[in-house]
């Protein structure tokens, strides 16, 4: 298991309600969801977010199974669509219920840095421009164009949002780190489902239709705290795993060199006292060379090396 696989396994446990225990005293997520709907209504009236054409409403039926009502359509059972079971105090929502992608505030004649992807990654110097879509420091920006579509950044300063980004709004009733962990868990799905050939784009239909399990607010906090505690161990595991991968990759070559080293040091096989010593072999080699020199087949060394043993030392 790689470090990323371990991380994903822990995140999967988190969103399934298996990482921390449930507390029966927690306010159920259904109450939280009611506040989210009220929050959305107020923001829609204020013109800060858009009204959905066909909002999704997921609820538990009398049979304790999940049902979904989309727009004016009749509710249908979605027990075969939700990816797993969740605790009774949790609720399912589509991502579109709690978040939107918006453009930011258009602004002119005021200088700010261009918050493009390269600058956000620390790969380029800041570029000052005097117009664009303004976002404030701390805003969440999601990459909607490019190879890494679905990646989320936090604006490090006030500035103009790069053209490949959208401002990611999500309900204040959701703990931001819980939401970001959920997106992190699904980043490969988003990355591998991009649309477009020349310039890949975020598959917004898939993004908004993702099923998000919402725990009670207090449990969200406990999950985030637990994930924060485990992060150090996950990173440590990943580092050791990388070291092991390098060792496994180099092991065949290292083993071969080690065996050859043992061989040339006389440590690979036992010596036999009845063997003709190498000094006699070396004399035959010298005789052979003299004969070949005399026949003109090889050239005589100008500075011939002769190594010999004296006082148990080599000269």
Image (cartoon, rainbow, N blue to C red):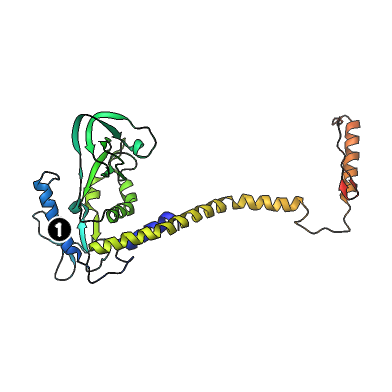
Near-viewer residue (109 or 201): 109
The residue lying at 88 percent from left, 39 percent from top is 306
74 and 187: which is toward the camera:
187
Q: Is residue 305 left or right of residue 231?
A: right
Residue 27, quarter of the rendered image: bottom left
Place of residue 237 in the rendered image (x, y in percent of width and height, measured from the top left): 47, 57
Position of residue 42 in the picture relative to residue 173 (left or right): left
Expressed as whole percent of the image width and height from the top left, the position of residue 218 reads: 25, 63
Answer with left or right where residue 235 lies relative to residue 80.
right
Q: Quadrant of the N terminus?
A: bottom left
Placement of 290 over or under 65, stated as above or below: above
Q: Which residue is drawn at the image coordinates 53% and 53% (left, top)?
A: 243
**Residue sitting at x 24%, y 57%:** 212
- Among the 4 quarters of the image, the one containing residue 150: top left
Instruction: Name the residue nearer the viewer: 163 or 193.
Output: 163
**Residue in the picture at 14% in, 67% down:** 61
Give the position of the C terminus as an image quadrant: top right
Can you give x and y, in whole percent of width and height, for residue 314 in the image?
86, 45
Image location of residue 284, percent across then percent down: 90, 43
Q: Is residue 26 visible?
A: yes
Visible residue check, residue 12? no
């Amino acid at each position: 298991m790689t470090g990323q696989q371990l991380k994903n396994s822990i995140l999967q446990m988190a969103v399934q309600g298996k990482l921390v225990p449930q507390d029966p005293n927690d306010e159920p997520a259904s109450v939280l969801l009611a506040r989210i709907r009220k929050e959305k209504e107020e923001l829609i009236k204020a013109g800060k977010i858009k009204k959905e054409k066909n909002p999704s409403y997921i609820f538990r039926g009398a049979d304790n199974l999940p049902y979904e009502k989309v727009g004016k359509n009749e509710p249908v059972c979605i027990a075969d669509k939700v990816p797993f079971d969740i605790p009774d105090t949790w609720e399912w929502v589509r991502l579109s219920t709690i978040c939107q992608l918006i453009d930011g505030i258009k602004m002119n004649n005021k200088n700010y840095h261009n918050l493009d992807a390269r600058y956000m990654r620390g790969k380029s110097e800041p570029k000052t421009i005097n117009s664009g879509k303004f976002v404030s420091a701390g805003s969440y920006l999601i990459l909607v164009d490019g190879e890494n579509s679905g990646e989320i950044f936090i604006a490090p300063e006030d500035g103009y949002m790069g053209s490949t980004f959208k401002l990611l709004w999500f309900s204040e009733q959701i703990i931001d780190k819980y939401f970001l962990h959920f997106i992190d868990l699904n980043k490969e799905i988003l990355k591998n489902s991009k649309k477009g050939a020349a310039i890949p784009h975020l598959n917004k239909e898939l993004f908004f239709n993702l099923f998000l399990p919402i725990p009670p607010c207090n449990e969200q906090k406990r999950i985030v705290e637990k994930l924060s505690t485990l992060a150090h161990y996950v990173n440590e595991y990943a580092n050791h795993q990388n070291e092991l991968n390098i060792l496994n990759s180099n092991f065949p070559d290292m083993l071969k060199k080690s065996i050859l080293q043992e061989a040339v040091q006389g440590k690979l096989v036992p010596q036999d006292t009845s063997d003709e010593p190498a000094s006699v072999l070396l004399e035959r080699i010298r005789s052979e060379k003299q004969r070949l020199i005399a026949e003109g087949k090889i050239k005589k060394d100008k500075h011939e090396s002769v190594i010999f043993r004296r006082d148990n030392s080599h000269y």
